[in-house]
Image: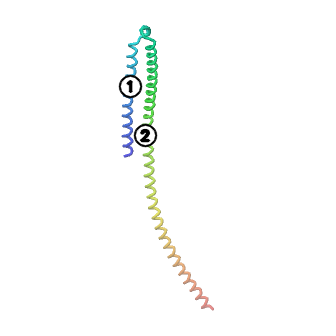
Amino acid sequence: VRLNVMRSLAKRIQASSKSFKNKQKQFMMRKKNQENAGNEFFDAEAGDEVDSMLTDEQQLEMIELDRRADQRQKDIDKIVESVRELNQIFREMSILVVEQGTVLDRIDYQIELTHQRVVAGNVELEQANKYSVQASKKFWWCFGILLVLIIILLGIVINKFQHKN
């Protein structure tokens, strides 16, 4: 059961990872298309003509907009890098889940095996206890019989010495 659950989780992680990769690919393509679309409208030669037609205030505003666009681009690049790192983490996590599942299966097997051995050990201890009690009873019976025989022999020896004297 545990193995099936782990496999199911691994499949879900893989599906999530694929979905993530597809979305990341789409995002990168849109980003590239946006960069290319912006380049079509602004030529280096045409930029000089546009700069000469703009007022100082408009040029400052354009510089500020360019600075903001550059900052946004840097932020987007950071996000893309973070998403890549997250993707790598998910891959590693998937591997760890599978490995840990294997380890848990081994541990579970060892626990079951140990339980079986403990139960078998308890049965053997109960038998040993029963044999010990039986042996103890036999010992006391033998001891009693031996004691009776010693008393009888002593009686015979004493009786012989009394008849000789």
Percent x, y for residue 29? 38, 22
Relative side of 7 to 157, left or right: left
Q: Earlier in the sequence, mark 1 or mark 2?
A: 1
Direction right: furthest residue: 165
Residue 3 lies in quadrant: top left
Q: Which mark is residue 97?
A: 2
Q: Nearer the viewer, mark 1 or mark 2?
A: 1
Relative side of 145 to 33, left or right: right
In this rendered view, identify the residue nearer to me: 40 or 153: 40
Taking the spot 37% from the left edge, 22% from the top edge, the residue there is 30
The amino acid type, in three-letter code, at marker 2 is Val
Which colour assignment does the render follow?
rainbow
The amino acid type, in three-letter code, at marker 1 is Phe
Taking the spot 48% from the left edge, 70% from the top edge, the residue there is 133
Taking the spot 51% from the left edge, 73% from the top edge, the residue there is 139
User: Dot 2: within a 10 Å radius of its alpha carbon, few (fewer than 14), some, or many (20 or more) residues?
Assistant: some
Please state, as top left, top right, bottom left or bottom right, where the C terminus lies in the image.
bottom right
Give the residue at mark 1.
27
Above or below residue 149? Residue 39 is: above
Above or below residue 45? Residue 146 is: below
Helix, strand or loop under label 1: helix
Q: Which mark is residue 102?
A: none
User: Dot 1: within a 10 Å radius of its alpha carbon, few (fewer than 14), some, or many (20 or more) residues?
Assistant: few
Percent x, y for residue 63? 46, 16
Above or below residue 158? Residue 72 is: above
Q: Are marks 1 and 2 in contact (CB under 8 Å)?
A: no
User: Mark 1 to mark 2: distance in Å?
Assistant: 29 Å
Helix, strand or loop under label 2: helix
Percent x, y for residue 36? 39, 17
Taking the spot 36% from the left edge, 40% from the top edge, the residue there is 8
In this rendered view, identify the residue nearer to me: 60 or 106: 60
Percent x, y for residue 112? 43, 52
